[in-house]
Amino acid sequence: MFVGKYELLNLLGDGAFGQVRLGVHSDTGQRVAIKVMDVDRIKEQRMCRSVRREISVMKRLKHPNVLSLIEVLKSESHVFLVCELAEGGDLFDKIVDQDMFDEETTRTYFTQILDAMEYCHSVGICHRDLKPENILLAADGSIRVADFGFSRAFLDHGTVLEVYTRCGTPNFCAPEVLSGRRYDPVKADVWSLGVVLFVMLAGYLPFDDVSMDDLCAKIRVADFSFPHHVRALARGLVSLMLTADPSQRIGVADIRRHPWMARRSLSRRTCGRKLSTRVSLRRDESASRLDASEQDMDAGGSEDSFDAALDSPAKAASPSRSASSRSPPGSYLSVALSGMDAEQAAAQMAAADQPPAANVGAVAALTQLDACGGAGTLPTRAAPTPPRLLWSDY
């Protein structure tokens, strides 16, 4: 089965909007990951703006540790995000396989994650859903930060814009995000970085509870403790990042200057053992998510405008890029990876986070499942034979 010049092969992941499949370019043999998104599902879940935002942000981001968007293809019923293939899987599976990382391995990965986030912040983008499932590994083991469905631009002519939206995964959310009040999204990303750092060192979540109310209560006061094997310098850095008061929380530049970042481990052995008395790390595919409310996320754009929004910067595929004779019938469009400049994109995405006038600080229900469709999951283990994609709409 072909999409444009790409043959769709193995199933790599499955989520709310569709699937992620291995793709191979018929001319060059390039292996890619193709996120296949069902337009009807996106509209039903009122996440059109989230998808548009993810595409817009990924067009702008060019960094060795950020997953690359190669091109976007479109049919009447599906949108296809053709991305760099991260053949090493995701950080979640890596942690589960090893129980936890030693300090040197943790520092190697964390430095690259920090590089990616510092770059994103430098161009005015915050992630807002950083977690191990959204951090991928290339074939050489280097980091690729992915899944920008909840990201947003936060700079307005050099000024940091505070936001209101509650979004992301609760276990990784900063206290101020849970509050529903204005917050600095950069500081919120630092908190999520701190949770990721803790998870790599400990092998479990610092904040977890079967009760959402109890989980939020722990997060609001930064109620967590370290396993015995985590050393003092690492504890100090994590504690500075997981400071409940965002005004007292360490910044990215100071994280880089922290002594732990420069220190090398004396040994490469894995520290400690799996702590069976602790809550184990689990993938959040069935967990509640903090998703932006309909008014907050989709203000200023109707669901019916989704096709138009994707088509506007696009042009019909040239004959050399059109579907081959083996492709399902239908007209594919290649969405241009150029377009609005940074200020236009920032203004457009900032508008999505303005609270409704009569409902400042409105928050969303904690009910929607993984809004980004699980696209960040590229497991290295062989997947079962995937079901056939249905092209009945073509």
Image (spheres, rainbow, N blue to C red):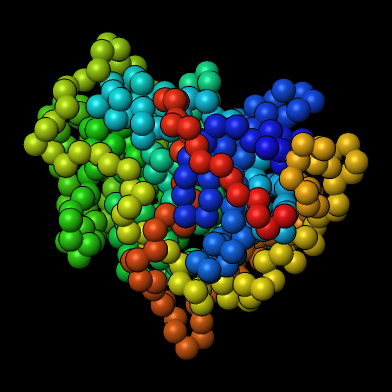
In the displayed structure, does residue 175 sit left or right of residue 149? left
Q: Specify the quadrant of the image occupied by residue 219.
A: bottom left
Q: Mark yes or no: residue 173 visible.
A: no
Quadrant containing the C terminus is bottom right
Q: Is residue 157 left or right of residue 386?
A: right
Q: In front: 378, or 218?
A: 378
Residue positioned 44% across, 51% down in the render:
129
The part of the image, by quadrant, that contains residue 318 is top right
Q: Is residue 87 left or right of residue 289?
A: right
Residue 151 is at least partly visible in this image: yes
Is 254 above or below relative to 15? Answer: above
Above or below for 352 versus 208: below
Q: Nearer the viewer, residue 356 or 7?
A: 7
Q: Nearer the viewer, residue 191 or 33?
A: 33
Picture coordinates of residue 92 (x, y %)?
A: 36, 35
User: Where residue 247 sits in the image (x, y, percent)?
Assistant: 35, 58
Please tell me which residue is depicted at 52% across the width and 18% down the height of the picture: 140
Q: Position of residue 387 (x, y in %)?
A: 51, 41
Residue visible at 22% across and 49% down?
A: 207
Q: Quadrant of the N terminus?
A: top right
Which residue is at 56% across, 42% downward?
A: 388
Q: Nearer the viewer, residue 108 or 171?
A: 171
Q: Is 154 located above or below residue 121 in the figure?
A: below
